[in-house]
Image (cartoon, coloured by chain):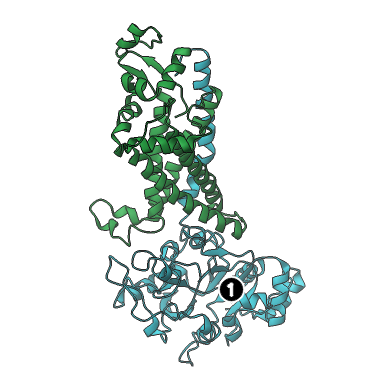
Amino acid sequence: MGDISRREFLKRSAASGLTGGVILSGLEGLAVASTGEPVGSVIDLTRCDGCADREVPACVSACRTKNRGRFPEPQENIGDYWPRDKHEDWSEKRGLTSRLTPYNWTFVQHVTVEHEGQEIEVSVPRRCMHCDNPPCAKVCPFSAQKKTSEGPVLIDEDLCFGGAKCRSVCPWGIPARQSGVGLYLKLMPKLAGGGVMYKCDLCYGRLQDGKTPACLEACPNDAILFGTKPEMRNYAYARAKETAGYIYGEEENGGTSTFYVSPVPFESIDSALKKQKQAQKNPQAPGFPTMPVEAGNYLNTPNGMAWGFAVAPVAGVVAAGAVAYRSFKGEESEK
Amino acid sequence: MMDNGVPNTVPGPAVVSPHPEAQENIRTLKRHGFSTRFVHWAVAVSAIILVLSGLGQLPLFHRYMVDELPYLGWTSDFNVTLAIHYSAAMLLTFAAIYHVLVHTLRREFTIVPRRGDFKESYLIIKAMLGSGEEPDSHKYLAEQRLAYAFIGANLALLLATGYIKVLKNLAGSDLPYEMLWTNTQLHNLATVLLILGVVGHLTAFAFKANRPLLPSIFHGQVDAEYARNRHCLWCEEIEDQ
């Protein structure tokens, strides 16, 4: 299996005119922001080892450190979601790093899959994919989420009601809910709302400061890359070709700005993750995404119906014209 | 809605006659034609479906365990409720465009609010509560005209903001977030106002004096005696034609 480093890729692509500059440093982050092009990232599973020598993977630690000040501080005695007798409270499990929670916006899954007669261990960093047409942001009933022009999908923590619809329409169920915090407490906490949703924002603040995401900066294996989306896509393909690997994230959910490159098919990873999930104490618990290949976008069905909104007014005009004409002819009138 | 009624015997063809003896034989008047009744019920049915499916988008049906009731498991499926919302919105769009256009082409504006409608509404409601004398009315009561304008304006706002939401959902659309945020809040606000408007519309029938109007939205006819007593200005307009 051939190998290609990020620096090597840069050298080759610059030489070929393929790309202008993949982000490697904070200073170059500013360069990407100024291109006006949407950003993207590559998560190279051929390089990620899940930081086997560390208790907590470096990307996870960096994310937690960077976002610590934004983690929710819920009120005491959190009420249930009436009429249900439960609520989501992760505040007692802030140290949990084995799944996505409001206090842990990225984590690493570990699977062992058989591929071409070999058992291969794969570590899979997981976080928001920052989709091209994100259903989470599009269908939020209060517009508490937005897709930025740069690519990251953001949640407005001051406006979020915590209904968790975004999690339901996400193919990976990424956003995590914390109750006992947020706007709903000021309105009808017993009757409506459920807290605030939290997830990775691709370190949007750092991007605006010309820096790269904290996870990228912390990765000791160059397994996470960041740059303009076209550059990242090109890199992912080059890397997949180099390693005879597979790509995930380009087609899923209608396209995302995260490209995974894996040495094994993603169907195998998804299958292994599903088995892990089923073996958990509560398989329904959120925060442990699988990797469904070619996952469809929730908005595909309604968008397929959208032509009806062009037909309906035209039909109204035609029908009104026909009825009015008959009235003028005296055939049908209420006068 | 914006139609002009004509007197009619039941059974029998439409007849307009100023002759007192002929008038006595008229038992009902035609108040609403097919167009008006179609639009009313298309708007009513689509609005009810839109409100319910919209509540499903909030989301409420899972929270309130509606989806655990028999045959209602689909209510918490956003894909299903959004498809229903879209379908009902198309019906509402058709009915609204048809309504505005057909009555504009026919020059039928009897339900459009007039100057003094607020004061007249106050007097009518006061009279229904047993105080004072009710002013004579045209085809529509003053409060009906105001209710029409209120509900119509909210429906127009819902349609406009709804269309923007449809555009927003399309892949590749890139509308400014500030505009989408405002659009969403207006859509939600108009929904609340529409619900209040519909509740007010239905509450009108708590008053016995208004109930004779009810049958006309089903079969188009209203009791002639009632019309002569309460909508005498309308009857005069008919006789003048």
Q: Amino acid at mark 1?
A: Val
- x, y (%) of residue B76? 34, 56
Above/below status of A133 relative to A54: above
In this view of the protein, can residue A9 be seen by the observer? yes
Question: Which image quadrant for residue A261?
Answer: bottom right
Above/below status of B116 relative to A329: below
Above/below status of B53 relative to B209: below
- x, y (%) of residue A49? 50, 85
- x, y (%) of residue A199? 49, 73
Question: Which image quadrant for residue B200?
Answer: top left
User: Measuring 55% from the left and 52% from the top, which residue is drawn there?
Assistant: B170
Looking at this view, name the residue that lies furthest to the front. B132
- x, y (%) of residue A4? 64, 79
Q: Tell me, what hue is chain A?
A: cyan
Q: Is residue B42 left or right of residue B184?
A: left
Looking at this view, name the residue that lies furthest to the left. B70
| Subunit bearing disc 1 | A
Q: Is residue A278 left or right of residue B141?
A: left
Q: Which chain is green?
A: B
Q: Quadrant where the N terminus of chain B lies?
A: top left
In this view of the protein, can residue B5 be seen by the observer? no
User: Measuring 68% from the left and 65% from the top, which residue is drawn there?
Assistant: A37
From the image, tell me which residue sits under label 1. Answer: A42
